[in-house]
């Protein structure tokens, strides 16, 4: 398996533009997580899905952020409109948790977003 | 999910064992202790996890105290490539993975 695949690896956009980050989890995994990492705030959990259903989105900073998981093999994180303070590295992770705490999560390489 | 407390930073000499402590005094019976590490600019990497018993794999050993209120991650022969931020996380059956600030381990030649 190729692991968790994120695209793009780097994104530079202008303030006000829409940004869509993509994630392909590991096949067979049923939990998917989106994180944001900055120097100031560290690794923050934004949202996580179980069996394609959003379970906890309390970490989503505001309405400009939205995440979807239309099927078990694809998820998107959208920011509209983007702002300079959204600049960060965004990580996607998946696990075969399925309601158990006994399965490790695997992370993608991240998308480095810069909003100018 | 229980909160964890780790030292902010530690140093270790190359070739020596690195012992990274973690306190999780509010852990409950069905919560697991996980360790991840993040090498600069990469995604976090799973290292090891356990519930009650000590665990060992090809990367590290995990020692959990009998009362489960603390644990220690042991890298038996640290190398320069083990320089990273190490996160201790307690996870319930929700599977929700929350990262704290972690311990920055610097392995020195």
Image (cartoon, helix red, strand yellow):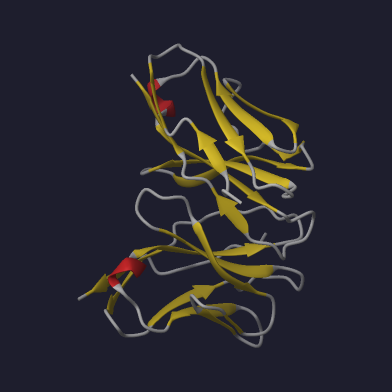
Residue B73 vs residue A78: left or right?
Answer: left
Q: Is residue B35 above or below residue A25?
A: below
**Which residue is located at x 65 percent, y 32 percent?**
A75
Q: Quadrant of residue B79?
A: bottom left
Q: Position of residue B57 (x, y in %)?
A: 56, 78
Residue situated in front as seen by the camera: B81 or A81: B81
For image coordinates 69% across by 62% down, the residue present is: A103
Q: Is residue A51 above or below residue B108?
A: above
Residue farthest to the front, as pictured: A1
Instruction: Classify residue B14 by image quadrant.
Output: bottom left
Which residue: 40% across, 14% down? A15
Task: Determine whether, in the image, residue A96 is placed left or right of residue B17.
Answer: right
Specify the farthest residue to the left.
B109
Looking at the picture, does residue A45 appear above or below residue B32?
above
- Residue at point 36% right, 69% down? B82
Front residue of this view, candidates A116 and B101:
A116
Residue B2, can we see it? no
Q: Nearer the viewer, residue A41 or A110?
A: A110
Question: At which x and y percent is residue B50?
Answer: 65, 75
Q: Residue furthest top?
A: A16
């Amino acid at each position: 398996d190729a692991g968790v695949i994120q695209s793009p690896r780097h994104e530079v956009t202008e303030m006000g533009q829409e940004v869509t980050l993509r994630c392909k989890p590991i096949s067979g995994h049923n939990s998917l997580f989106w994180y944001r990492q900055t120097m100031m705030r560290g690794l923050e959990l934004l949202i996580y899905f179980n069996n394609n259903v959003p379970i906890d989105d309390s970490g989503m900073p505001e309405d400009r952020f939205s995440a979807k998981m239309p099927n078990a093999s694809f998820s998107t994180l959208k920011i509209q409109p983007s702002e300079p303070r959204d600049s960060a590295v965004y990580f996607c992770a998946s696990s075969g948790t399925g309601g158990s705490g006994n399965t490790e999560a695997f992370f993608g390489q991240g998308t480095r977003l810069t909003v100018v | 999910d229980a909160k964890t407390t780790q030292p902010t930073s530690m140093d270790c000499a190359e070739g020596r064992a690195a012992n990274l402590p973690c306190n999780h005094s509010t852990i409950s019976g069905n919560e697991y202790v996980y360790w991840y590490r993040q090498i600069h600019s990469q995604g976090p990497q799973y290292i090891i996890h356990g519930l009650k018993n000590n665990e060992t794999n090809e990367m590290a050993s995990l020692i959990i105290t009998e009362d489960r209120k603390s644990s220690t991650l042991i890298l038996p022969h640290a190398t320069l490539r083990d320089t990273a931020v190490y996160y201790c996380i307690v996870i319930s059956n929700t599977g929700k993975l929350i990262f704290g600030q972690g311990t920055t381990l610097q392995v020195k030649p």
